[in-house]
Amino acid sequence: MSAALDTLLQNAAVWRGAGSAPAAGAGIASGFSALDEKLGGWPAGALVELIPQREGIGELSLLLPALAALSRDERWIAFVNPPYIPYAPALAAAGIDLAKIVVVRAAGHADALWAMEQALRSGACGAVLGWPGFVTEPAIRRLQLAAETGHAPGFYFTACGALPRTSPVPYRLRIDARPSGLQVEILKRRGGGAVAPLMLNHALAVPGLSSPAAGTVSAVRRIA
Amino acid sequence: MIAGGGSRPQVIACDAQAQAAGIRPGMALSAAYALSPQIRVRVRDSVLELRTLEANALWALQFTSQVVVAPPASLLLEVGGSLRLFGGLDALRARIREAVAALGFDAVIAVAPTPLGAQWLARAGLDIAVEDAAMLHRHLGRLPVAHLDGQRATLESFRRMGLRALGELARLPRDGFARRFGPALLDRLDRAFGHRPDPQPAFTPPARFRAGLTLPSPVTEVEALLFATHRLLLQMTGYLAARNAGVARLKLAMTSEDNLTLDAIVALSVPSRDPKHLANLLRERLSQTQLPGRIESIALEALDVSQLAPRNFSLLPDREQSREEKAALVEKLRARLGDDAVHGVSLYPDARPELAWRETEPGTRMQPAPKLSRPAWLLTRPRRIDLREGAPWLDGQLTLLDGPERIESGWWDGEDVMRDYFVARNPDGATFWVYRERSAEGRWFLHGLFA
């Protein structure tokens, strides 16, 4: 392959059609081998939309191993408008260096998007997680550019209802809880088409508690 | 147009429109009114002039530590010691010229071996660099005698003796000159020509930077306000450069026509003297603020000033740069969203879950704590859970996966907690951190989500 073509393919803006391998190199290990195999890790300079079926099914636990690894680096890990308090004891238990966490509370939707964009663009963040509510197409494009500039992955969470069918975001993942673990459906990715939903071990969300899939269902107690 | 005070006010300066009407500087105000009754007159404010000059003296400290304020409109800079640092006289003059223009002033920059010489040349409008005594004699010699002394009586005697230029004065016999005009005048002439040393009282900068200005016309727009602030920022950064310092906290005080005031305070985690960065921070802060009407005057004050670490001696330049980038991001976010809107988190040794963490300054390092089964999301306030058929219900009946973990604490500060915590899951697969109060009622609460 010519050097010029190589350079071109390195460019994050170039979309490579289905059938080719996941973009090599710069990915950040997610901590889930099944996911890394399909995505090539979390993309270092791109936007990822995460769509949990509902709150509290383990959507954050999907990112915790990567955040723990990223927090060993110097850069910030920014939480922009999280819906709840990012609970320090749990983050610390997941191996995240709390000294790298920055929580940003923006009063409005526009300010939340602005803060995400600034954080992504600054180059000072290893990852930016945002809960902006909704994101319009122009906003997605701005955030994507900012992520490329700052070479950081930007994750934003949207509710499952009223999803637009198409979106310029390069990565879209739907997350659902199943009795056997966390089901991740890759709706869109770079360097490949749709794949069958992946099942991930759910145990991470509840540290210290083994996965129901591992045969601990008998420990479950119902309240009469 | 500006008129001087006193019993017989005079026109000191006037704009092009006034000149077209025939008005000239030096004219009596009454005569100016006669020419054009609708002129707008502003009284000269010599106090404000002096303050402006002093603010510019602070700014000039970035070029040399020896600055002299020479009212009404001159600054003297001793640049002999600065030439090497700035790469020669031409480079330094160019630098100063550029910086003066950025401040928004017109200046004549004259260089001479003596302070008086430089001052007179500049006042005469000669924008030149005089580097030796012979050249100084030539240029000073051509200046009118009024530079030496503006007293009417002295000027009259010069005129009667037919003396017009300073050079002619310098050629007079010294003892005769001293007898006729007094030794003080001879001394002054000697100092100008460099026959006598002329030590100058150096300007001592105040411990704190504060400079203000009155806007030419009141403004309501943030951008216009920032434009006006630019000059003050440059004055401040000059002052900071002289001290190899940066500002950590600065205040922009604004006063409206109705005398309402508003202070915008910007705090920086890493001190800076970059006028662009500071202007950006002020812009973010002001864009979130409602101006109290039409702003008439502003003042900039450096509240906290501290030394800047010498950058080039850093052993880990990448780390240093990353530290600055990180601080800059936090500042930028805070400038627009408010100081409280950006924080870090840390652990806190308290058994009560809601108190087991603290908001901190981002980047605060803490001791690691024992690992517990805790949810990634905590609710700001525990939320009451309904019971259905006696069992806790959150979009479906909850199944308890783990627990109870008994937490009893806080009896000493009245915030006592007696709870049994459980990990619970609903039929959708959402996992919750819930507790039951250990009281007669036994109410259930949601406290966190294992997201």
Image (cartoon, coloured by chain):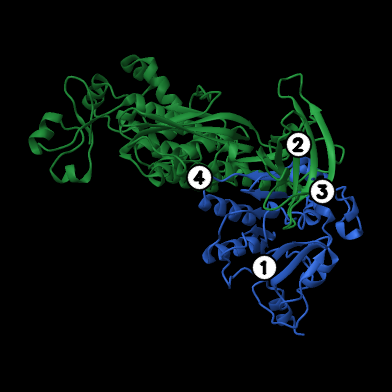
Chain colours: A blue, B green
Between the C-alphas of marks 4 and 2, the distance is: 46 Å
Q: Are marks 4 and 1 on the same chain?
A: no
User: Is B94 placed above or below A189 here?
Assistant: above
Tell me which residue sits at (76%, 18%) in the image: B412
Q: Residues within 10 Å of mark 1 (few under 14, many from 20)?
A: many
Q: Chain of mark 4?
A: B
Judge if badges 1 and 2 mark residues of a common chain. Answer: no
Q: Chain of mark 2?
A: B
Inter-mark Cα distance, 2 to 3: 15 Å
Residue B100 vertical position relative to residue B245 in the rendered view, above or below: below
Between A60 and A29, the one nearer to me in the picture: A60
- Whether callout 4 and callout 2 share a subunit is answered yes
Residue A78 location (% of width, % of height): 68, 49
Where does label 3 land, which residue?
Answer: A222
Q: Nearer the viewer, mark 1 or mark 2?
A: 2
First along the sequence among labels 1 and 3: 1
Q: Gap in Å between the C-alphas at discs 1 and 2?
A: 38 Å
Per the rendering, the mark at residue A172 is 1
Q: Residue A209, how many percent across, how many down?
A: 87, 49
Q: CA distance from mark 1 to mark 3?
A: 36 Å
Query: Residue beneath label 2, please?
Result: B436
Using the numbered discs, state the Cα–Cα distance from disc 3 to disc 4 in whole angstroms: 54 Å
> Outermost residue toward the left?
B34
Q: In this rendering, would B422 be left or right of B329?
A: right
Residue type, label 4: Glu
Q: Which residue is mark 4?
A: B284
Looking at the rendered image, the quarter that the N terminus of chain B falls into is: top left
What is the x, y in percent for residue B211?
A: 45, 30
The three-letter amino acid code for the residue at tag 2 is: Arg
Q: Residues within 10 Å of mark 3 (few under 14, many from 20)?
A: few
